[in-house]
Amino acid sequence: MQFDIITTPIQLSEYVATLDNSPISLDTEFVRTRTFYANLGLLQVSQNEKIVLIDPIAIGDISAFWQAIDNKACILHASSEDLEIIRQQKGDLNIKLFDTQVACAFLNHGASLGYAKMVELIDGAVLDKGESRTDWCARPLTQKQQHYAAADVLYLEPSLVVLQAQLAEKKMTDFFEQECQMILDQKMKPIDPDKVYKSLDNLFKLDRHSLAIIKALAKWRLQTAKARNLALNFVVKAEHLWLLAYYQPASVNDLKRLNLLPNEIRIHGQNILSVIAEVSAQDPETYPPLISRLIDFPEYKKTLKEIRDKIKACAEKNELPVELIASKRVINEYLSWSWKLNDQQRLTATKPKLLSGWRFELIGHQFNY
């Protein structure tokens, strides 16, 4: 397998000048352990059977490459984390995505077939995945690391050609392309700091005052994590946010009694207490509404089973993985939209996945719960 390694701005500029409108295969290698933002260690690119490994650590600024892929067809596999890095580096996701894992799902090869399994299925080649957990930010890269990285884009375009032919035969091309665009659109949605608390556990156990506190603390934690480039749980653990909201400490000694980590108290203790005090001084009318659980709705279990049965029958009829059409989370999103919002709220709220795009066409139009 032949590939070039780009380590200087001049080499990158010369390579970018060779790019044409043919599909570009992309993969990223990164490290993210304690940081909020992933550290890009290597970028693998293939176009017209020419593979290059771009070293962002050696080059520094690789924005010339990101600008060059504007509006280009980009082939990735299991693109979620790669897209986060591309957006972080590029500022947008102005590309046409072809995700080969999604294509495999529409061909009923499982909802999340791995790259190596796809290559073995389509090409018969067996890939060595031994370097998957290596430190991609360490230098120098070994020959084994380089070959492993290059192999991650070697098979993307030839695999897509086979998959696209099979999708066309199955009449799933339009659905596949819709799903890829929805993935891009979802990744481009900014995180709303005022809504991040809604992803935390056990909110239904909190009163409105406590919900206002956890909402404010979750927003503060996100902003702090971004500013300090720390993983969220290295600011304050999620479960500790709940304890803070429930017990509403007013002093450092109160924080210690909640068994927060020493670093949480030492670095962030005063900020935490300030956030709690500010919320407690607010008008209670501004507090968020109570959180209701779907499981507490009398018809939930019965309705969930009915919807799952319909989706399973639809999946079998169309030879699709059930999870591709709708996971339990997607069903719950639909039921929350249907049951928890009034008519006016539903008009302005984002439509749930089950009532959007190809899912609505395939099965969602049947639901009226």
Image (cartoon, grey):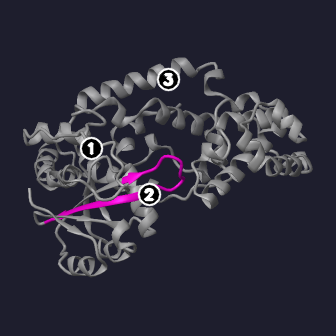
Question: Which residue appears at 74% of the width and 35% of the height?
Answer: 260
Overall secondary structure of the magenta section: strand
Distance in Å between CA atoms under marks 1 and 3 = 42 Å
Could you tell me if the residues under marks 1 and 3 are in contact, i.e. CB atoms within 8 Å?
Answer: no
Q: Which residue is mark 2?
A: 39
Residue picked out by circle 3: 304
**Quadrant of the rendered image containing residue 143:** bottom left
- 219 in the magenta segment: no
Vertical arrangement, residue 266 with respect to residue 244, above or below: below
Q: Is residue 317 above or below residue 96?
A: above
Q: Nearer the viewer, residue 299 or 270?
A: 270
Residue 366 percent location from the top left of the image: 41, 34
**Magenta part of the protein: which range?**
30-47
Where does residue 275 sit, x and y in percent of width and height? Answer: 82, 50
Residue wearing tag 1: 131
Position in image of residue 322 (x %, y %) = 33, 29
